[in-house]
Amino acid sequence: MLTFKPVAQRDLAKLRSYYENCSYRLCEYSAGVKLMWRGHLHPQYAEAAGCLVVKNSIDGRLCFDYPVPGADGDEDAALGMIEDYCVETGGKLSISVVPKEKAGKLLARYPHIRVTNLRTWCDYLYEADSLCDFPGRHYSGQRNHVNKFRRLYPDARFRVLGKKDLPLIEQFWRDYEAVFTKESPRAKRELVLAKKMLRLTGKPCFCVGGMELNGRLLSLCLAERCGETLIDHVEKALYGYEGVYPATVQEFARHFAVDGVRWINREDDAGDKGLRTSKLQYLPAELGEKLCFDVENELKDLDTIPTIHSERLTLSPLTEEDREAYNALCLDDERNKWWGYDYRRDWKGEDLSEYFLKVAREDFAGKLAVNFAVRLDGKCIGEALLYRFDGKGGAEEGCRIAPEYAGHGYGTEAFRALADWGLYRLNLSHIVAKCYKENASSCQMLSSCMRKSGEDETFYYFNKEV
């Protein structure tokens, strides 16, 4: 299973080894965003199948970036490992800020998805040549502002900044805060984070520069090259110098949008009206859409657990009347050593008389599993369930029968009935199961219902598909 570690400054080189050639053009696929916004994104990363896999937790909601392949990376294999991670941890799979060009792959991969595409997420993507030259009538406003800046401040010069310029940058922040007027919490937080980012001036992966006049910085920019895109993480200027922003945008592009840089990403506007107006005035070539794919499963439209009939048995929802029998089944350690799950792993000390039925209901409400009572003449004699839905049309099946009812084929009958319902009523494409190699009776039962698909040191694996 994937093992993640929190993103920290010491991981800059590792992240850059993937992002420096990344072609996605979106700001989230950069080391700068992961570092600058880590207090909000809480990013963690792992390497899988030659790809960088990033897991974020935003306001408690788990989501993954689309895998970023290295030289020999396998995106499909990395996606599979993300899927396995979510199945193993019981989390829902959400792949966010997906580049538009990757949407087709995910639409084909997942039969049940909910796609979100918010305008406020879109990055502003500009042709680098356009920001270098401000060509044509449609850029006449920017050219006029730049010309006025040159007339008013003929001694102002753009300069590349390095580590030795950190004192000059600190003075800029003092000057900037003296004229900073925004009151929104987001704007104030962004300023704090921008100041922290500029302390990385001198790191080879970041391009830093600004307009200087008489030994004083009038503006600052910090960007990072990812593939053919220069991603601007920080753009600040002193408000009192008319035309300083377009002059800085142009000069920054001229100095750093070189050697194959085709695009400049000035990031999103976060729904801020002033930022949106400003970014649109520079005439983006396109808006970089960021799609969020929330992967769902076949339980998404199932409001209630149905009743399934077989020759001798009925499979139906667990009820309060089943509590005693169900608790006895769940607490039978001797029999459940073959179940492959120990309730103590997740149990937090709750009242066990209430716990098991509560968990089954919560799992169904969260669309993680569907648990059926196996009934003989109305009495609960066992449990059958579908769980570990993989989002790609598959689920795992399990079945256990109380010891006093063992040896009569009830487990096989219940297993077959649920498998048929899953494949032909719930419309799964395949169902898998496994059993311990030492569990001869389960192996015999599964062999009669499914096709053996493999084995490892611990389990035999089985599969049934349409």
Image (cartoon, rainbow, N blue to C red):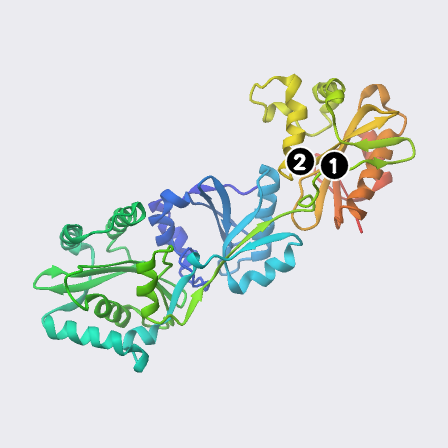
What's the residue at 45%, 59% (across, down)?
119
- Gap between marks 1 and 2 measured at Cα: 9 Å
Q: Name the secondary structure under disc 1.
A: loop
Picture coordinates of residue 230, whole percent (x, y): 35, 65
Q: Which residue is mark 2?
A: 364
Q: Name the secondary structure under disc 2.
A: helix
Query: Mark 1–mark 2 contact, CB under 8 Å?
Result: yes
Picture coordinates of residue 353, whole percent (x, y): 66, 17
148 relative to 363 in the view: left or right = left
What's the residue at 30%, 45% (across, down)?
185
Position of residue 251 relative to residue 82, above or below, is below
The label number, if any, that marks residue 44 in the structure image:
none
What's the residue at 76%, 22% (across, down)?
322
Residue type at the position of mark 2: Phe
* Quarter that holds the N terminus: top right
What's the residue at 58%, 26% (across, down)?
346
Picture coordinates of residue 363, whole percent (x, y): 64, 34
103 relative to 440 in the view: left or right = left
Q: Nearer the viewer, residue 210 or 372?
A: 372
Position of residue 439 relative to residue 424, above or below, is above
Residue type at the position of mark 1: Ile
Q: Which residue is mark 1?
A: 305
Q: Image quarter for residue 320?
A: top right
